Image (cartoon, rainbow, N blue to C red):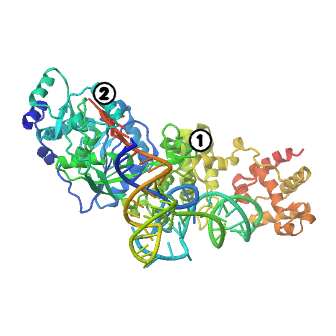
Amino acid sequence: MDYQKLAELCFPEVTQTPEDLEKIYPPRQLPEGARVTRMAPSPTGFIHLGNLFGALTDERIAHRSEGGICLLRIEDTDEKREVEGAIPLLLEALAYFGITFDEGATADGETGNYGPYTQSHRGDIYKVYVKKLVSEGKAYPCFMSEDEIAEIRQYQTEHGINPGIYGEYARCRDFTLEQVEEHLKNGEKPIFRFRSEGDPEKYFTIVDGIRGEISMPENVQDVVILKKNDLPTYHFAHVVDDHLMRITHIVRGEEWMASLPIHVQLFDALGLEPPVFGHNTVLMKTDEATGQKRKLSKRKDPELSLEFYKKLGYFPEGVREYLMTILNSDYEEWRMANPEADLKDFDFQPSKMSSSGTMFDLNKLNDVCKDVLARKTAEEIYDFMYEWSLQYEPEKHAVIEADKDMLLKVFDIDRGGEKPRKDLVYAGQIFDFVKYFFDGYFEYESPWPAECSPEDCREILRLYIEGYDPADDNSAWFGKVRAIASQLGYAEKPKEYKKNPDMYKGHVGHVSSVIRIAITGRANSPDLWTIQQIMGREMVERRIAAATEQFK
RNA sequence: GGCCCGUUGGUCAAGCGGUUAAGACGGCGGCCUCUCACGCCGCAAACAUGGGUUCGAUUCCCGUACGGGUCACCA
């Protein structure tokens, strides 16, 4: 068989050789040890936590190395899955979470010397390599119909034979030049398959950047490398692209591990050096219905979508922090030791990534967010709330915009210092947390303390407003509350009450609860004196008066 | 089903032949305290399982169970 002739017959239009391409895409001139990574999504329009998870990994691995590059490549060899406008959407979402690329696809084109970065525009490049393989007898045109393949599959499954097109089932594998010519003359368009010489009895080992050494049997399948639409399959495209773009480290989901033998084989057949592969895990959750651990699902789990977090108003930094804690095992400790340090200074190591399925933990996310927000200034929080409400909550936005000065003071309560409050989590929750400052959102959310009779409540409020003086400092103010408590038969100190519960109706805490609920609608709040300072006399008096009405 | 990967407290996880088996989140109890939050102290809670190898296994090897992935002209 004259493979050279077969190659010409199949690809008369292809004149370039791999050597030509080597010249166009020469090895990068980068510092020793620089890592080149890539994010390679399909433009399906759905951007999820897994994407961010992977992007963060790629970005960190690249940028942790001197002169490293992280690029964006669009894997659109399957037109069926493509969604209009998916790329700008993706870029925007990633940028929101602080991830940008050095090279590759952009919202309106692309940048870099190793393009095109969109696979559908690289058709000619892939063909050069397919032609080379054909000319060496390592790939061949295949004319089997879908029906034929389906039949073979059925036969194989019925007989307990490993399914697929390989060996004797690869009917076009050993076609003569004449047979190929004949099919071509009939107007049949072939696809191209790799001619596998793999031996399933033979195992090879490879060092995975995350998992360490893994061993697998060689691939035997004559996988499709060029499809009917003239575009390559993922297997072939990734090999060609990652080589030509001079990628050094590939991090991808563990769903790719099973096809690793194909990829290794392809690199080998092409005479190319494979990059370091790292296979990470999928994000899991416990299914509410079954109680079973399972992969986060696009259909069932809204929390998989990045939009979910944007909409609730999670700070991007918080989400990123959380992802980092589950991405690299020693991140959390590093963060505790370096609370103020830039994420970029963390020594990210692929080998420190987990290789068992990670449960997504909203609880932990919230906790991480609290820490992140505790380090923000009131101004930063306000600005974020402003943008968030502008986009998602127009009604709340109106109040947020109108009462900027007040909100800045509210967000500043117990902020800064050694022990800042940590009760702010995400924008939606924050608004809820402070909404009693707005008359339009104020309501009585907590029951009045049982220790205080309605008459006492009325009396407490009357005495309170009588003695209320905004000029009092915190301790003078609370001294008056104690006095009211004492006057009405409540203990001035909770401990006294605990010692002699029969001597009192309750203690000063119950009395201040009445005042607190009157002013905030809640039994729990930050320091009441501070709240009143922010609200101002007029609002305090109005709230007390309204509460008094409750006891008429 | 074949092949592959994985398995330390409820969750995230240190550990890489000899440890009282870290730490974080959550839970519980306490201190502080007018409430909440913060902070501090403490408690409960784990090496899936059976065989080896070894003076000694959470750590190395094999089997089993369980979980996950994958078997497309989808990525």
> Which mark is on residue A151?
2
Residue A459 at what x, y percent from top left?
90, 54
Neighbours of disc 2 within 10 Å: few (<14), some (14-19), many (20+):
few
Tell me if residue A224 comes above or below residue A252 in the rendering.
above
A285 vs A506, left or right, is left
Q: Which amino acid, by three-letter code, is at mark 1?
A: Ala
Q: Residue at x 93, y 65 (%)?
A: A503
Q: Quarter of the image containing the N terminus of chain A?
A: top left
Q: Residue at x 54, y 52 (%)?
A: A361
Tell me if residue A484 comes above or below residue A90 in the rendering.
below
Asked where in the image residue A173 lies, by quadrant, the reply is top left
- Residue A528 appears in the rendering: yes
Query: For numbered disc 2, what is the local secondary structure?
Result: helix
Task: Return the chain for callout 1.
Answer: A
Q: Residue at x 91, y 63 (%)?
A: A504
Residue A252 at what x, y percent from top left?
36, 49
> Which mark is on residue A229?
none
Query: For numbered disc 1, what is the local secondary structure?
Result: loop
Q: Closest to the observer: A180 or A300? A: A180
Residue indicated by mark 1: A289
